[in-house]
Amino acid sequence: MKEGFRQSMAWLHTWSGLLVCWILLLVFCAGTASYYRNEITLWMQPELHAAAGQPVSSEQAATAAQTAMQERAEGATRWFITLPGERNPALQLGWNKPSKPGEKKKGRRGNFHSEKADPSTGEVLSKPRETRGGEFLYRLHFDLHYMSALWARWLVGFCAMFMLVSIISGIVTHKRIFKDLFTFRPKKGQRSWLDAHNVTAVLALPYHLMITYTGLVTLMFMYMPSGVTTAYKGDQDTFFSEAFPARVGETKAAGVAAPLTPFAPLVRQAEQRWGAQVGFVSVNLPGDANATVTLRRASGRDMSSKQPTMEFDGVTGKLLATYGEEMGGASNTHGVMYGLHIANFASPLLRALFFLSGLAGCAMVATGALLWAVKTRQKQAKALAAGKRPSFGLRLVEALNIGAIAGIPIAFGTYFWANRLLPVGLEERPKEEIAFFFGAWAVAAIVAQLRPTRAMWRIQLSVGAVLLASLPVLNGLTSGSHLGAVLLGRGPVAVAAFDLVVLVLGLGLAYAAFRLKPLPAKSVKSAKPATKADVTPDTAAGAA
Amino acid sequence: MSASVQTEKLLRWPLPEALHYRLGVASRSVAAIVGGYLLAALSTMLLSVCLPMARVEAVMTATLASFAIYTCAVLWVFATSSALRAWLGLLIPGAVMAAILQWMDALSWSLA
């Protein structure tokens, strides 16, 4: 491109980063929130706050689940039981019923029914309000919304490749990567933004590289199927049965009724064999003579996403087969890379560090986008001082920056507010909450396009700040588990943690808005054009 | 703003400089996105059938490595001195790999 390797890499870094940064910011924000998707869902269902009961053994929980399913899931062909774990105190029960002839299929989930139950008794927990909760944010970070999941995944993968190229070329561009870690020159305009971009990028660099690459790995057989098509002549089923050991094919129902074997001895047997808890139970054809029960190990602290399973005869309780206990090096590597991305193994402290690194990633993307705008404005400084308008590209980027960096927190805040303020019995409630998320974001983005000014930054950051920082108050008013009650030990810790995190994020946004106070008259007159660069980058970290 | 001096001597089309530069960037972008993907896909195919390990392991290894290869291809496209060199740098190794795969009777044109 230009003279020299480093210069061409700097060019590549700039453009590969800029072109996709707004989608990346959404993916990063939603992905970072997904580390706490269970906790977010809990916060969004205040009806369940009181039900954080005593821990129950997997054996007891499995037995309770079996009894509950036999009563409530009559005629189902498959059962899915997620046993309680550290981060989800409730039993999660699900079942599939065959669709009756002539009945219309209900969406993509078909005749799937799910509910949460008390792990000691198996009773349905007081029916919580309907919400997609943290699950929406999790899906948003790779399926986007209002579009087909397939296209969305290709789009997100495309952006992730840009990100990967941008990270590698960004590393090459750096002359003094170590020194940059300790360099921050506040209140210096463009230089401050550069430092902030460097610090957030370099500080969590291993994380950024890991999360981008492993993100591609989670969907790699979709993005890069050529290995399977070549080595397996396109026979994907054979490949997947070898790569993800599980039984191939479906068992036909015998049509003869037979009682289901009790779960407790199976769970005991599996836990003895693995030396770890059982996390998931699925039953194929319950109540039929050909029933099978499959147990999967809980993810625990094991880094790999691939957990071994044991399959039992559903009538006699005899062990039929075990899968996934021995794995090849590459398969294990794949499992660990996948596992690193979803971080199911993370202890509370590690999870918090992942979350902070994710926030650093948001800040890296945001400061990078801002840096481009500030630099370009500097280049056009003479023309601007002479009264010319900013170029189309600059105006567009500045407006998109406001709509994304200040707009996404508004969307998140609105989503949580809608969760508490919409009537509990509302039809299609989850859809409405999501509509509020995108509605608020669309308004922010459009208004930003109309007037991409410093005042607009201030307004939108303030709105985001108010929406997020006041969530603890909203929670206190609309549920019994306000901060005070939880901190005194009467309520789930996760709810208090959510309140505190959104409070801190909201205060960060408020600080950013405060730093953007209107410029005093004399600095407007000074030769240096007034830019957003006058904000220090630590506020951007808050903004992200 | 312009491409390097040597390439201009070699490959200077009678075009205005700015247009020449823009076409170069456009050509490299296609080379990076499409050509880079094809190169990564071909190397994944080749590694999947050539690596001395169990078939499933070879496919796993090749597919895991594919995004690194893709990234390297993109870096090459934008680092080299001209768009023509960028294309050649992708097409020659790509053609060699395709020829080996064809000779092994393993070339698959369907990507899905």
Image (cartoon, rainbow, N blue to C red):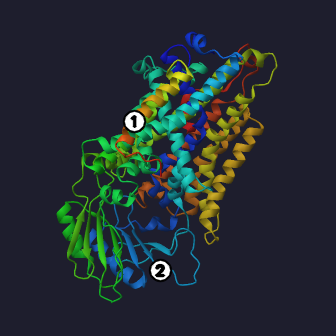
Compared with A353, A221 (above or below) is below
- Chain letter of the residue carrying label 1: B
Q: Is residue A273 visible?
A: yes
Task: Give the image quarter of residue A428.
Answer: bottom right
x and y percentages locating residue A13 in the rendered image: 53, 27
Circle 1 — which element?
helix
- Find residue A340 and report its horizontal and vertical position in percent: 36, 46
When the figure is inspected, residue A456 is found, relative to residue A265, above or below; the finding is above
Measured from the top left, where is residue B13 in percent x and y?
A: 66, 17
Q: Which element carries disc 2, helix, strand or loop?
A: loop
Query: Looking at the image, is A477 positioned above or below residue A505?
Result: below
Viewer can see residue A201: no
Q: Pick whichever, A345 or B51, lies toward us.
A: B51
Disc ID at residue A98: 2
Q: Amino acid at mark 1?
A: Met
Q: Amino acid at mark 2?
A: Pro
Callout 2 environment at 10 Å: few (<14), some (14 to 19), or many (20+)? few
Residue wearing tag 1: B97
